[in-house]
Image (cartoon, rainbow, N blue to C red):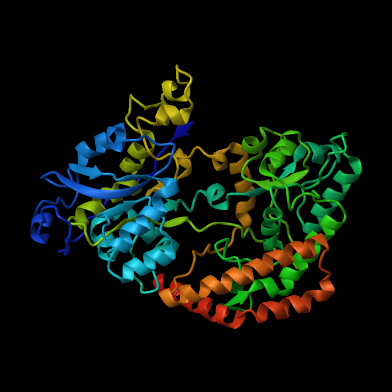
Amino acid sequence: MKFKFFSITLIAVPFLFLVACSDDDSEEVTEEEALENLNEEGFPIVDDKITIEFMTRKPPTTANEYNDVLFWENYEEKSNIHIDWGLVPTEGFSEKANLSLSGGDYPEAFYISKFGDKDVNKYGEDGVFIEMNDLIDDYMPNLKAWMDEYPEIEGALKNADGKIYSVPTIYSPEFTSLIGNIKPFINKEWLDELDMDMPETTDDFYEFLKAAKEADLNEDGRSIPYGGSDIGGLFSYLKGSFGIGNIGRNHKLFDLDPDNEDELRFYPTSEGYKELLEYVHKLYDEGLIDENIFTIETNEFHELGADESYGSTVTTSPKTRFDSDSYEGMPQLEGPNGDKDWVYLTNPVPHSDAFVITDKNQNPAATARWIDYFYGEEGATDFFMGEEGVTYEETDDGELEYMDEIENDPDGKTKEQALKPYITWLGGGYPAVVEQKYFDGAEAEEESLKAAERLEPDIIDEIMPKFPFTIEENKKLAALEEDINSYMTEMRDKFIAGEEPFSNWDNYVEQIESMGLDELKEIHQKGYERYKDNIGE
């Protein structure tokens, strides 16, 4: 595994006088004292050592004591800031964090918090999570640089009131294999045996699936033209071939109206959605899709893929999932009306709430500087790699690689186990930037990167984050979306499987409209307009 790193230039920032408060039993620090102790740039962050109290979501892949981990030991020495980590296992974190907040006995910051938009909004407006707009502007130049370059990142962080109460996990927008996640793959050996070209249209794809079924290329009766871990992967890939889902996968119900981009469209009742259902139903009805796709277990999906029983699939990486080199990425298919968009992409901010600072924090500016390190080149290197000469080395061509003792532990430990004493990024959700240069997941496999490259010419213009809603709107959405989503998914599967005839389409539309669709549209439209305001459109 090879690693390279990006560079974001630090910029001069004005000094802002911040007000901090604390109501715990420890000795309080005045705002003036906290700021006098702070260095605006460089290291150490503070002259006199301080301690910041965290509550930290601890994945099982990480060490039991973070202050004994090499990276954090080094960063404490560099920053002159000691962290009281307050480690809580992942499975119990949400409950303990919520209890601490409701009881008033909460820490100065939450690390890998992932509270969710609703809680961030609530505790932000209540003043428990402090506003970070000015902190970002004045003390977080690395994160600020990402936000300036990619407005959609800023749009993902701003709440309905225009304020930012948390900092994110960022997937680099240039790492399309990661933001694309699952991608379409075709069995290239089957394609060669059938003497067929790579499908370019939905009609071509149908002809390939049909030919694959008739030829039974696996010669054991287990040749499956299309198979997946569920029907959702194929359905989502094909949305862009039928003119729907044009703002990305963060929005399961709405996209932009093709006739008026100032208005959202509820696309599960659109003509394009119906045509997509009819197309996928045709594939299923003719036996071109695995008959067990609605009930298949993950292990069975992997086994069939490893046996090369699939002519095509949608997944992250057949190499990783199936240990097979027989697949290559497909292009975005052109649909019957000329639509051809790669739409199933995640906004570059998968977690807008990776880290929050509370109103008990006595050193918010120092805390902001501490966390900003992980959005820059040096911090990314340290965070993901550890210490040069101990956990990684630089090759002759300038790339960074984990030491052989990590890759091939002499005691037989896995890489994760070997890394435990040195780093804590394993488990994800951290406040930092993920780039292809140092990512080691399935999306960084060569076949996955090539698949994304093939799809890139048809990528949509903007991958929108979830829209910002008020507390009251979120309460209404919780009920409306749960009911409509559940009914829509149930009917999608029934239409595809043939359990519901398309002659009942009008009944389906009327039922959704009766479930509060007008109110749902109104709330989402308000959220969309706030999002545009937040990014200056």
Task: Say left or right for 271 vs 114.
Answer: right
Measured as percent of width and height from the top left, residue 347 is found at 50, 58
Give above or below for 418 relative to 478: above
Name the one closer to the observer, 175 or 224. Answer: 224
Task: Say left or right for 241 vs 193.
Answer: left
Residue 376 visible in this rendered orientation of the protein: no
Q: Quadrant of the C terminus?
A: bottom left
Measured as percent of width and height from the top left, residue 484 is found at 63, 72
Name the residue: 62% across, 49% down. Answer: 182
Task: Say left or right for 108 vs 121.
Answer: left
Measured as percent of width and height from the top left, residue 64 is found at 35, 35
> Picture quarter containing residue 345?
bottom right
Give above or below for 202 relative to 479: above
Name the one closer to the observer, 194 or 239. Answer: 239
> Picture quarter containing residue 73?
top left
Name the one closer to the observer, 173 or 510. Answer: 510
Residue 237 visible in this rendered orientation of the protein: yes
Name the residue: 35% across, 29% down. Answer: 421
